[in-house]
Image (cartoon, rainbow, N blue to C red):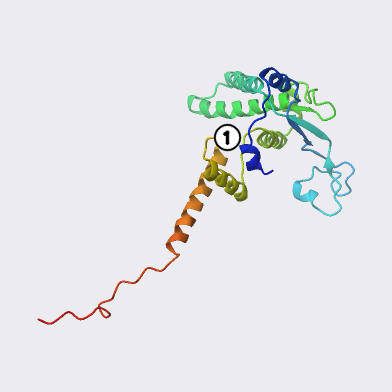
Amino acid sequence: MTGADRMFAPPPDVPHGELFARLCAMPRAGETIPFPRVDNAKCPLHARAYSSADERDTPGCQCAPIGSVHVRILVQEELQYAKARGLERAKQRLAKNFPGKEEAADALDDLVSMYTNVELLHLACRKSQSVTEPFFRTPDDVEKLLYVDEIGVLVNAYVRIQNTLGPFVSQMDQATCDAMLDRLEAEGSARFPLDLLSLGALKALLTRSVSRSSSSRTASSSAGTPPSEPTPEASPASPTP
């Protein structure tokens, strides 16, 4: 069954009480990933330096991730908390530094983003051996132990996992677009769950639809060659008075 077939498939008939019980019993969606820091202590090439990604591609390099971390998807309440804490901590930091009015807005946006990422990772990261236990004891651990790039890698991983395991279809290839458009043409839009498509996927579907429509019109117009208009040389001579 293709992705398009699954999206068009009717939902199973499950009683409300049983459906809610299933929802409560399901484990939190998540994925275990390599922790974005390498152990180079045993590497003969980079034992005395923190090697870059290019250096780790060198033949003979034995740098390896120091371990793994489980990244779980947050529920709405947790994400709201992370954003609220991020805003609160950003305001507290700005109150201590007293930036100028022109600098305050940009500084606040940057700090809110950074603190929100810290709070998000504190809530989302779990021990790979026991996914119910926090990986970081407090948000301070995230700030004091991780480099800026490592926080960026983990946040990117969180977004990818959310897009992969969540209900939104965020990316579609041409074959999937064509399959969905074929179903739309055959059955109409009543059964098609457009709510499951992200804005990017909807744009991809629309772009592919326009491309198919344009190709269809081009093919129809080139099916036969219209007769050419007679040129003055080929036109019959006008009768003389």
Above or below — where is 225 with respect to 75? below
Q: How many marks?
A: 1
Q: Position of residue 22 (x, y in %)?
A: 73, 22
Nearest the eye: 87 or 93: 87
Q: Position of residue 211 (x, y in %)?
A: 50, 52
Is residue 8 rendered to the left or right of residue 214? right
Name the residue at the left extreme. 241
Is residue 101 rendered to the left or right of residue 59? left
For label 1, the crowd category at 10 Å Cα-Cα, with few meaning under 14, some 14 to 19 and many 20 or more, is few
Q: Quadrant location of the N terminus?
A: top right
Residue placed under numbered mark 1 in the picture? 193
Q: Quadrant location of the C terminus?
A: bottom left
Label 1 residue SS: loop
Type of amino acid at the residue the image marks with label 1 = Pro
Q: Position of residue 123 (x, y in %)?
A: 72, 24
Residue drawn at the location 72% of the way across and 27% of the way down: 124
Nearest the eye: 198 or 123: 198
Is residue 16 rendered to the left or right of residue 69? left
Nearest the eye: 3 or 123: 3
Residue drawn at the location 52% of the way across and 25% of the way down: 104
Q: Position of residue 70 (x, y in %)?
A: 78, 31
Nearest the eye: 74 or 99: 74
Q: Quadrant of residue 136?
A: top right
Residue drawn at the location 65% of the way across and 22% of the way down: 82
Above or below — where is 136 with respect to 33? above
